[in-house]
Amino acid sequence: MASLDSPNSPPNCSSFAIRETTTHHKKMASLDPPNSPPNHSFAIRESTSQSFLRSISTKETSFAGFHCSPPRYSTPTLHTSPLSSPLRSFNPNPSNHTISLDASYKCLSSVLKKDGQILSIAISNGIIYTGSDNNLIRIWKLPEFAECGVLKTKACTVVALTVSHERLFAAYGDTKIRVWRRTWDGTLKHVKLATIPRTGGYVRSYISGKDKMMRHMGPITSLAINISDNILYSASLDKTVKVWSISDLKCIENIPAHSEPINDIVVADDGILYTASDDATIRVWRRNFCRGEWPHSLMVTLPAKCSPVKTLTLTADGGVLYGGCTDGYVHYWLKGWLSGQLQYGGGLQGHTHAVMCLATVSNYVISGSADSSSRVWTREQDGQHVCLAVLLGHRGPIRCVTAFLGHSGEEVEDGCTICTGSLDGVLKVWRVTRTKSASGRYVKNDYFELDEGV
């Protein structure tokens, strides 16, 4: 392990390298002072050649000089959960979480298709879709994780994917959304339905001066579906969220949601919309069931500790909202069961650079970061978060992540399977398993010591 910078030295964000270690039993040599304030200079900004990787914030340092060594092919090996990331030791004091030593993980598969950077991922009914900065969407079948198809278009850069009711929605770098219908007639097939906004409708809106209403003026960053209302949301760097009717694929509303570019959106089962932006806030929107020009109204604005918010995720019951920020923290808010109000719960510390993607399944939370690592957390019944594992192996920032319970399609609660896509062009599949003590309970450690030479 290379030497660590002292706690008082500023982090070097212009260039760094991540080494894939074969053993994770060595502990870090030092801890940050318990009372030291969070360092908000960990943020990483994309270069001009990576124009569709979330947004470009004026509050972030440059991606120029970012070291991304070629991917290494490795056979599946078993590891125990390390205590900290390679670049900075883990300090459990600032937030309400602990570290578990009773979890193991292994890399099940590592695939490089030379499609360029992997930018988006979605999972539905045992099928995984991945999008990259070329014009292909690759289709993978679980549990064997075998490639079973490719969707090809003339447009490039698949920046966002989402699936609902056997329909696949894909946002591209040309600010348009392509829609496919999935069928299971003996074999898996995809039929392209439409491209939105439709050309004819856009021409008419351009003539009438409403073209800004019909299409985004900047790259799309995220897609989300409100299943109950049958509508599709799209967020963009143009600081707006557009609302599309899935039945006729028409834009029915334009929401000027933030003062800075919007990086991610999620929708709860109750129809509440959450938007994350470079203005360091998360905004909560409610859809009013009335006829008017602005059916969506702002409920509350959640500050994110002066750090641009890059990614969001919700627990299945909508009780916890997680936001990944450029300072390396994963902040979370708890929803009151009676009042429905969101209250700040704390921040999960561990990443050394911007958190670029999040995913939840059951009580697991998975974060992917520009420091080339993924962290797997679990939320206990007492509200504490336990860091189960730090997944190392990618040679570039982790841009997208998804997860599902069990292994090989088995629905078991003792672990989860995780898929991570990185800017190094590699797609990895991980298996994280949490072991039990002799009493049958999961063990967590509230304190640990650092011994040199261990």
Image (cartoon, rainbow, N blue to C red):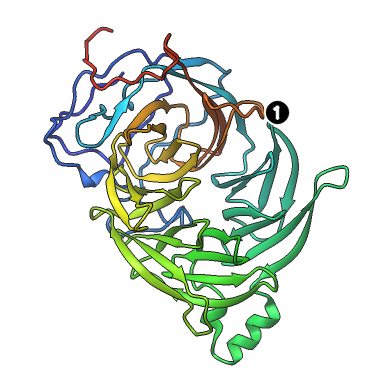
Give the secondary structure at mark 1: loop
| Residue 337 falls left or right of residue 191 | left
Name which residue lies at 33% across and 49% down: 333
Residue 74, position as x, y percentages in the image: 56, 20
Compared to residue 248, the image places residue 348 above or below, namely above
Q: Quadrant of residue 181?
A: bottom right
Closer to the camera in the image, 436 or 122:
436
| Residue 443 falls left or right of residue 128 | left
| Residue 265 falls left or right of residue 244 | left
Three-letter residue code for mark 1: Glu
Question: Among all residues in the image, which is located at the extreme right?
Answer: 186
Name which residue lies at 70% across and 74% down: 248
Residue 405, position as x, y percentages in the image: 57, 32
Compared to residue 390, the image places residue 301 above or below, namely below
Please name the residue that numbered disc 1 is placed on: 144
Q: How many marks?
A: 1
Residue 182, position as x, y percentages in the image: 76, 52
Question: Among all residues in the image, which is located at the extreme bottom?
Answer: 208
Compared to residue 117, the image places residue 17 above or below, namely above
Name which residue lies at 29% across and 19% down: 445
Residue 252, position as x, y percentages in the image: 57, 78
Count residues near mark 1 (Cα–Cα under 10 Å), then give few for <14, some for 14-19, many for 20+.
few
Closer to the camera in the image, 91 or 76:
91
| Residue 72 falls left or right of residue 448 | right
Question: Which quadrant is the N terminus positioned in?
Answer: top left
Q: Quadrant of residue 140?
A: top right
Question: Which quadrant is the C terminus positioned in?
Answer: top left
